[in-house]
Image: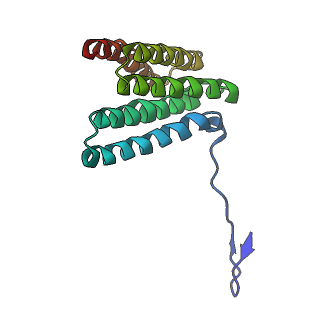
Amino acid sequence: MTSTPGTSKTLTTTTPTIPSRWRSSAPLLVCGAASIVAGGLAAAVTGPTDWDHGLWVAAFLVLVGGVAQIGIAAGQSELTPSPPTPRFAALECALWNVAGLTVIAGTLLASPLTVTIGSVVLVAALVLATVAVRGAGRSWLLLPYRALLVLLLVSTPIGIALSWARN
């Protein structure tokens, strides 16, 4: 607490903190935010450099690497009676981001096998995301969380098929 000179008012200053339920999801949140920024940078250089895959990379980074990862972190933090352990969240984050980078590398290298391997790792991360919310109560947030997971799961084989069809 600090006092303002000449007044009797006392000011209280606090440092904003991450709510305790969200702490274990910090790796997912940070990596998700970094992916959104990286996607923006990819989009920014696509036009001036005539990068053929730039728009796809930007969209993948923003939507899968960023928005989906943050959505998963938010769902896990809010839906479960107790949030995932930091170790669980770190494993999930590692799988998610290794999968994303592998899919991007496979696309840039025109290697459908690499895309497939990355997609399998992504499905493993989706399994963890599903396990993380078991025991969740009847919250209205469970529906959009599950819808996000189903959307990602359904789009994964579509992405694999497109990769094989293009190469």
Measured along the vertical axis of the image, is residue 12 above or below residue 115?
Answer: below
Q: Nearer the viewer, residue 71 or 167?
A: 167
The image shows a total of numbered marks equal to: 0
The structure residue drawn at horizontal position 36% and vertical position 24%, both measured from the top left corner, is 107
Looking at the picture, the colour scheme in use is rainbow
Q: Is residue 23 left or right of residue 108?
A: right
The structure residue drawn at horizontal position 47% and vertical position 14%, both measured from the top left corner, is 117
Q: Nearer the viewer, residue 37 or 150?
A: 37
Looking at the image, can residue 103 be seen? yes
The structure residue drawn at horizontal position 38% and vertical position 18%, both measured from the top left corner, is 111
Q: Is residue 97 left or right of residue 45?
A: right
Residue 131 placement (x, y as % from top left): 57, 15
Residue 68 placement (x, y as % from top left): 43, 30
Q: Is residue 153 left or right of residue 28?
A: left
Measured along the vertical axis of the image, is residue 144 above or below residue 34?
Answer: above
The structure residue drawn at horizontal position 56% and vertical position 31%, both measured from the top left corner, is 78
Residue 146 placement (x, y as % from top left): 44, 19
- Looking at the figure, which quarter contains the N terminus? bottom right
- Looking at the figure, which quarter contains the C terminus? top left
Residue 8 placement (x, y as % from top left): 71, 81
Looking at the image, can residue 83 be seen? no
Measured along the vertical axis of the image, is residue 60 above or below residue 47?
Answer: above
Q: Residue furthest bottom?
A: 6
Instruction: Tell me which corner region of the image, top left, top right, bottom left or bottom right, holds residue 23.
Output: top right
